Image (cartoon, rainbow, N blue to C red):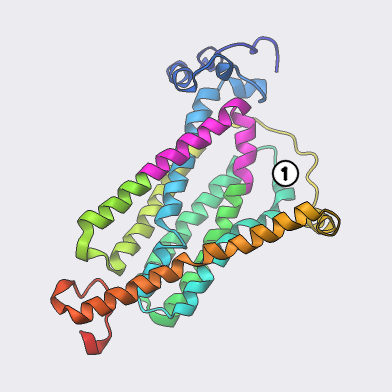
Amino acid sequence: MSESTQGQTAAQVGENHPALGIVYDQITGDEDARVCKDIPEAACRHLPRNFFAYLVANFLGKVADELSSARLVLPWLLGAIGTPAAFVGFLVPIREAGVLLPQLAVAAYIRRLPKRKGVWLLGALLSAVALVLMALGAMTLDGVSAGWVVIALVTLFSLARGLCSVSAKDVLGKTVSKTRRGALMGYSAAAAGVVTLLIGGYVELFSGRKLGADFFMAMLLGAAAIWLLAIAAFAAIREEPGSTEGGANAIATTLRSLSLLKTDRTLRRYVIARALLLSAALAPPFYVLLAQQHAQRFRGQYPGAGDDRVYRWPAAQA
């Protein structure tokens, strides 16, 4: 970065976006935080714009992920349309592995691209398409057939999210100053958490008897719409071409690194502990199934207490 941009505030550096620069200066606070650092000089001119565009896109992506959660929303939907419980057990492993494993295969290719924003946009678009198809599948199918369709689309969704994950960090590193990245992620996570709590509060307090399969299908369609908004926000980022060197084969590098598990006892213990903790992520979907079974028993004991549209009760209890 040239001396001409060192020490300038975002409002001064981001001369193309003076209003955003002023707001950026206000929310980032101290003097050091306003200095454009660690990114290409050309990107400094768009720092305020990129900061807010990334913040909005990241916030919307987090909200969309919660509305299509493989731990809560999808298990409830599968239970509501009569899918066998065995399918629920596959949701979280596919969702988590589908995000992480493809990054090993595509990271080197993405590294060769001077601009990586397009990879994120493609992943976000595929995520929206997968959610729409998931909702349509739940509307038109039930039982085992619906389960297979949802599992296939969760796989597609996870692969798409993997594209977003591996490219987002590169775009962030080239467009937002290092001193502001933590604040950006914190603001977006906090805002997404508040919105998620509000949605949960609405579901608990006001929806009452209307929480049938249609409700969760609507959540998936809403998540897809939010992904489209996130695409619009991320597309507003001004990304400068970056380095394309150093893209080693991630799979080969990972295989070579496995030898560290033999020689580094601390690392080995950490990996084992993390692997054991993963079991906690597998539990929430089954709590959802237990909650549905409890609701079914309650419905059987008190036929007038609910709405037949909420669950598909056994014929003997209808």
Magenta segment's dominant SS is: helix
19 versus 285 height, above or below: above
Horizontal side of 118 relative to 235 (left or right) equals: right
Residue 239 percent across, percent down from the top left: 60, 32
Q: Position of residue 243 (x, y in %)?
A: 74, 34
Q: Which residue is mark 1?
A: 111
| Front residue of 134 and 316 | 316
- Report the span colored magenta: 166-194
Residue 76: x and y in percent read 37, 68
Looking at the picture, how far across and down is residue 92, in whole percent? 53, 65
From the viewer's side, name the closer residue of 109 and 197: 197
Could you tell whether 236 is left or right of 72 in the image? Answer: right
Residue at horizontal 44%, vertical 60%? 131
Q: Quadrant of the C terminus?
A: bottom left
Placement of 79 over or under 259, stated as above or below: below
> Which residue is drawn at the image coordinates 64% and 56% (left, top)?
100
Give the SS element for disc 1: helix
Q: Tell me if residue 156 is in the magenta stretch.
A: no
Q: Tell me, yes or no, whether the highlighted magenta stretch contains residue 171.
A: yes
